[in-house]
Image (spheres, rainbow, N blue to C red):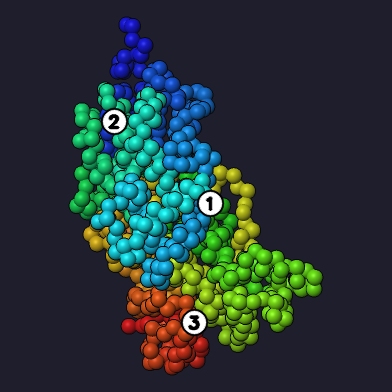
Amino acid sequence: MDSPFPPARVPAEDAPEYLARLNPEQRAAIETTDGPLLVLAGAGTGKTRVLTTRFAHILLSGRARPNQILAVTFTNKAAREMRERIGALLGAPAEGLWLGTFHSLCARMLRRHAEYVGLSSNFTILDTDDQMRLLKQVIESYRIDTKRWPPQGIMGVIQRWKDRGLTPPRVSKAEDCDFADGRCRAIYEDYQKRLIQLNACDFGDLMLHMTEIMRTHPDVLAQYHRFFRYILVDEYQDTNTIQYLWLRLLAQRGEGQANICCVGDDDQSIYSWRGAEVENILRFEHDFPGAHVVRLERNYRSTRQILGAASGLIAHNEERLGKTLHPGRDDAEGEKVRVISVWDSDDEARMVGEELERLHKDGHPLSECAILVRAGFQTRAFEERLIAIGLPYRVVGGLRFYERAEIRDALAYMRVLSQPSDDLAFERIINVPRRGIGNTGLQKLHLHARARDIPLTAAVLEMLAEGQIKGRAREHLTALMKCFGQCREDLPREGHVVVVERLLEDSGYLDMWKADKSPDAPGRLDNLKELVRALADFENLGGFLEHVALVMETEENAGNERLSIMTLHGAKGLEFDTVFLPGWEEGVFPSQRTLDEGGAKGLEEERRLAYVGITRARLRAIISHAANRRIYGNWQSAIPSRFVEELPPEYVHATGDATRARHNGAMRSPVFGATPFPVVARRRPVVDATTSDTPARRSAFPIGTRVFHQKFGYGTVTSVEGNRLEVAFEKAGPKRVIDTFVEQVS
Ligand code: ATP
Ligand code: MG
């Protein structure tokens, strides 16, 4: 009677409205407020809803004040949504909550205790560019052969240590790997010192510093123990070691049980490549003795058909706990999952566009539709199609294709090629890749151009002629201007595709990305090749640039009524009425990198990603695979993803739609009976990283090699000069091309 709190379990008939709407297992998960609790359940079973309602329940039952609950979500978007839903349950906006991602929560804590690690509370958080710049400065004094040990690789080693909670003194000698001749640990230590001197943190430091402070300052930890009476964690399957350590420190108090509630699904663990450890979820009961484990088996999101398809697919994984999922909605029979085979990516985009138009006409809101891709390069075809038919879209968690840095750079090169007086474009690329032109150099250039009333490119030429540019910059700018000049001369004769390829290669721009060892560099190269592919659809460079300018302009004001395009990774936790899952082909999904290097574990993770994809759909899931795909700029005939075959046939309606393709004469597959289709070996030309920035590197294609070029078709290499090939094309005649843009034909 005297208890300040209402009884933990409210009889069903007296339950507040927010509890009455839940099933008994969900209610149990919410009403077991005290002690450790793990909700381990499949997609769409209401885990996030349980967490949100639990938050509100703790507040409404007076167990804690808003700032006494710590709630962790996987993305900022998820945090925003949870805050809104809690506000709706409380009937008032929720303020002052400790609700956010691991990083945002840690940043907020670290501002309070920065001095313990030698920072002041106004420390800056560096972006990735700044991090690299700083690391390169540190490396300089080590005289490391950066060709052999690229700084990006060293950064990778440091980040992995940080993900595992290893501060420099905690890195044992044995941990220090062969990378950089065993000097990574020393570099790491110096890099951390420099960060402190700059009063700065990198992203990984936010968690690392906070965890270290709590480990070494019991008073700080005790303060947080008093502070946070309840801890809630969503997407627990994707926590990495440092996040796990941080949570455990906060949750394991000396006295009494930890009030920690984690929800997760081992089948949706898709971030092992970023150090996530699915074992954390399996260890929960061991770490928190007496933990309750609640399983939820009713899926309230998807139709029975979608659920059947997703469950059948994930059953092919061996490493899983195994869960049953029953449809939780009465109206939930639904339509079968559609698997559509299309001709190529343009046809795929057309098919998706038509479906979307039909749905839109029938009154389905666009905001309830999503296209979920495996890799960033896939979005371009959809974006162009959607713009062409006027359907508004947003690319969630990433940039629209033509807004990506590498695409904008390449476009700037093309703009200067077509219009030497385009100063804005020239300014963008003058020092990309680095050509030794600093701010002062650029200023001088501007002054000269303004004084003479000439464009920057002309100013460069004049200043070079007058000997006003010296040293490394002189050498590089002379080469760049020569390259533009030559390309401009070649343009009318050789056509825009070949010349743009040459420009990107000879200016050193492609080499810059090839030498970049950061994880997103291969994706950027894929995007660049996709850009050149798009170029081939236009008569000339001017036409293409005009098209792009128009495409970029369409930053429409469609409010929320837009469909979403995002990666499968970014779609975790979200739901839509209709989900399109394009590109289900071997080499795209599962990705080529997984097939080459991922082994059985990698493949299981890709399959979990497929499971995440299908289970985002409430009513409709439409999977497609193309018979032919231009990857790395070249045509390849594609095999449907193994995941397509693994879908249980009773839940699938397959349509072979490839024949209604755009009939692009020369590009017909033998399967469909037209001109023979190129079977292209799946390999990239070998680029030796150690020599990639010397222009005269050896080509991977000796004389006599039979090759395929996306625009000119088949041909035979007749001469080789560095990376330039002279190819006798069967239809297009002799042409000079860059080796990056041809593939050997088997
Ligand atoms: P995921 O694994 O994809 O993150 P989840 O387990 O977090 O999924 P939620 O997003 O919380 O699932 O819930 C899926 C959908 O089902 C939501 O639209 C939610 O509102 C609804 N839902 C959950 N529980 C119930 C219920 N008891 N009755 C009706 N609808 C429910
Ligand atoms: Mg969820």
Residue 578 can be seen in this image: no
The residue under label 2 is 252
Residue 453 can be seen in this image: yes
Relative height, residue 289 to residue 664 (above, below): above
**Residue that appears at 55% across and 69% down:** 434
Give the mark nearest the N terminus, 2 or 3. Answer: 2
Residue 327 place in picture, x, y as percent: 29, 38
Q: Secondary structure at mark 2?
A: loop
Amino acid identity at mark 2: Gln
- Residue 719's label in the rendered image is none
Amino acid identity at mark 3: Pro
**Residue that appears at 35% across and 59% down:** 184
Residue 709 place in picture, x, y as percent: 45, 81
Instruction: Please name which of the two marks, 1 or 2, marks the residue nearer to the observer.
Output: 2
The residue under label 1 is 394
- Residue 695's label in the rendered image is 3
